Image (cartoon, rainbow, N blue to C red):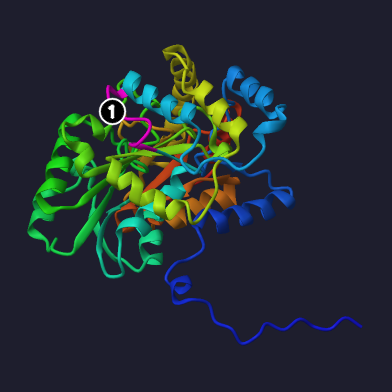
């Protein structure tokens, strides 16, 4: 007879109690159970591109994977070709000069960069400004490193930009770092040089590191911008960028950060004690992907534009309003005034129409009256989602 396993009287570290399991981690389990029961849920939740990388990217991966000498451990700083590839990409598209040897650090996805940056700069109790609404990982990682979480509100009437006047009136004496994300997720607000100049000036004035998370600048956006294009920005800013969205490589976990040499070195100290370098054939393939011409981005955006049109129709069917000028791979919409809340509305759509959309509350209290639709879904599925939702009586 097999013995019953009993958990020893062990408690986890306090930091485990400071965070919850990621919303999508929990909800996608529920969606999987619904699908197993034959519900055929259409997922418009997660922003995981369903389009493939370029043919040249995949061919380069396969070619290098056949080389017997490319399967060993790789440098923590990435191969020189990859760092140069990122530097050339920044010069071509953002007009930013970066030293590939000292000002670029490849990352295993920019999500890990949030942790490495936080560990490198934040002591327990240090203040960190996080956007509300904003990517939940900024808050959860700040809690894990025991920083003092200071949310700052982004409001629709201010174009989803920081209220600098309100920030200046707050106590910033212990603030070490500020997370920003433009083009913005979840709101779709675009970046601008004026905004970036204000952020750099704010960081310089108060000695606050400005970290811009910048994975969406090529999606439905004619003019990609980097905060590092502001003169002197590298002195106080760090920018992360990712190949997940612009190059359809989310599962590859290929990303980077750029800043001044000292900041990069401090982050490398942390990173080199946590992981090892990335698979070399993937690094070579990423170099090839970074050479994509304008036609690559244009073709991808034609697909997203047609999907955006359908997502807009879904928003209207749910009774939501939205800003036509949004960029990025999501559509952010304000729910009807009579709706109970974003979670209740999203659950109604899920359980009655078998369509999964993201409730805005997961991005913070300022997202409570909004929902988000991912464009990472083929037109046929979006049309089917629209047909299903049209059968609902949403506000009853």
Q: Which residue is mark 1?
A: 225
What residue appears at the point 36 percent right and 54 percent down from the top-left corner?
A: 138
| Secondary structure under the numbered disc 1 in the rendered image | loop
Please, is residue 96 above or below residue 390 in the view? above
Question: What residue range appears in magenta?
Answer: 94-104
Give percent across and percent down for residue 264: 34, 44
Please, is residue 259 above or below residue 58 in the view? below
Query: Of 126 and 358, which appears nearest the observer?
Result: 126
What residue appears at the point 32 percent right and 58 percent down from the top-left corner?
A: 365
- Crowding around mark 1 (Cα neighbors within 10 Å: few <14, some 14 to 19, many 20+) is many
What residue appears at the point 52 percent right and 37 percent down from the top-left corner?
A: 390
**In this rendering, does residue 351 appear at all?**
yes
Judged from this view, the residue extending furthest toward the bottom is: 9
**In this rendering, does residue 135 appear at all?**
no
Give percent across and percent down for residue 237: 24, 43
Quadrant of the drawing holding the N terminus? bottom right
Q: Does the segment drawn in magenta span residue 282?
A: no
Q: How many marks?
A: 1
Give percent across and percent down for residue 340: 39, 58
């Amino acid at each position: 007879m097999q013995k019953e396993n009993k958990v020893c009287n062990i408690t986890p570290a306090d930091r485990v109690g400071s965070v919850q399991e990621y919303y999508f981690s929990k909800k996608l389990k529920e969606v999987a159970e619904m699908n197993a029961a034959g519900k055929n849920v259409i997922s418009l939740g997660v922003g995981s591109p369903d389009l493939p990388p370029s043919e040249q990217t995949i061919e380069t991966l396969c070619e290098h994977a056949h080389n017997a000498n490319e399967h060993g451990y790789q440098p923590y700083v990435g191969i020189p070709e990859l760092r140069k590839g990122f530097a050339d990409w920044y010069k071509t598209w953002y007009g930013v000069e970066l030293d590939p040897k000292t000002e670029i650090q490849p990352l295993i996805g920019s999500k890990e960069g949030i942790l490495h940056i936080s560990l490198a700069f934040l002591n327990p109790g240090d203040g960190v400004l996080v956007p509300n609404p904003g990517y939940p990982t900024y808050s959860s990682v700040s809690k894990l490193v025991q920083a003092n979480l200071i949310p700052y509100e982004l409001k629709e009437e201010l174009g989803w930009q920081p209220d600098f006047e309100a920030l200046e009136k707050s106590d910033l004496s212990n603030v070490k770092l500020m997370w920003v994300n433009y083009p913005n997720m979840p709101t779709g607000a675009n970046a601008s040089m004026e905004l970036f100049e204000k952020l750099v000036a704010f960081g310089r004035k108060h000695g606050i590191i400005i970290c811009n998370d910048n994975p969406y600048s090529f999606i439905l956006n004619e003019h990609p911008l980097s905060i590092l294009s502001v003169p002197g920005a590298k002195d106080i800013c760090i920018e992360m960028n990712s190949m997940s969205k612009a190059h359809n490589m989310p599962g590859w976990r290929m990303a980077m950060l750029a800043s001044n040499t000292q900041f990069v070195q401090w982050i490398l100290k942390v990173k080199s004690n946590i992981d090892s370098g990335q698979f070399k054939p993937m690094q070579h393939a990423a170099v090839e992907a970074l050479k994509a011409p304008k036609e690559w981005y244009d073709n991808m955006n034609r697909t997203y534009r047609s999907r955006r049109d359908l997502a807009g129709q879904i928003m209207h069917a749910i009774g939501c309003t939205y800003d036509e000028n949004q960029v990025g791979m999501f559509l952010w919409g304000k729910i009807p005034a009579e709706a109970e809340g974003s979670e209740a509305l999203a659950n109604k759509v899920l359980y009655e129409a078998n369509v999964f959309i993201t409730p805005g509350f997961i991005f913070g209290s300022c997202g409570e009256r909004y929902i988000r639709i991912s464009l990472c879904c083929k037109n046929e599925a979006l049309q089917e989602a629209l047909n299903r939702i049209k059968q609902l009586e949403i506000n009853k």
